[in-house]
Image: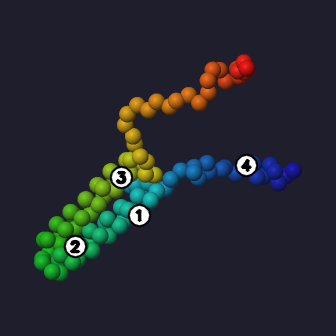
Amino acid sequence: MALDRHAASFPVYKGLQQPVVFKTLKGRYIYWGLASVLAGFLSAVLLSVTVNFLMGFLGLLAVSFSGLLYTNSRQKKGLHDKTKSNGVYIIPARFNGAVGARRSR
């Protein structure tokens, strides 16, 4: 009985079912954002070596920001891919009459 009172005194964290959030990116989109930033750095290194520093810096900005904008637009659609259908759908009734009514023979 003393063990039950002691266990009930600890606070319980109730936010375990929430998605992980990092700088407004949620769930799998954290990895997408990280990949776009890393791709920006890779393009900056390649452009700096082959062309010049200014082109590398512009490549960093272009690739990173375009990747983050794409990630943000995909995140606004939701964590899971959903098909959104426009229009009015009429679903036919499956039953004739009331649910509990019997047919007369």
Helix, strand or loop for disc 3: helix
On screen, residue 85 versus residue 17, left or right, reads left
Q: Reading the chain from its start, which is encountered first: label 4 or label 1? A: 4
Q: CA distance from mark 1 to mark 2?
A: 20 Å
> What residue do we see at 22% from left, 73% from top?
44
Closest to the observer, 88 or 41: 88
Badge 2 is on which residue? 44
Badge 4 is on which residue? 9
> What residue do we see at 41% from left, 60% from top?
30
Q: Reading the chain from its start, which is encountered first: label 2 or label 4? A: 4
Badge 1 is on which residue? 31
For this orientation, the residue located farthest to the right is: 1
Residue depth check, mark 3 versus mark 1: number of the one nearer the observer: 3
On screen, residue 39 versus residue 26, left or right, reads left
Q: Reading the chain from its start, which is encountered first: label 1 or label 2? A: 1
Q: CA distance from mark 4 to mark 3?
A: 43 Å
Q: Please, is residue 105 above or below residue 78 in the view? A: above
Residue depth check, mark 4 versus mark 3: number of the one nearer the observer: 3
Q: What amino acid is found at the position of numbered circle 1 in the picture?
A: Tyr
**Proximity of marks 4 and 1: CB atoms separated by less than 8 Å:** no
Image location (x, y in percent) of residue 90: 46, 30
Q: What amino acid is found at the position of numbered circle 3 in the picture?
A: Arg
Image location (x, y in percent) of residue 76: 37, 47
Badge 3 is on which residue? 74
Q: What amino acid is found at the position of numbered circle 2 in the picture?
A: Ala
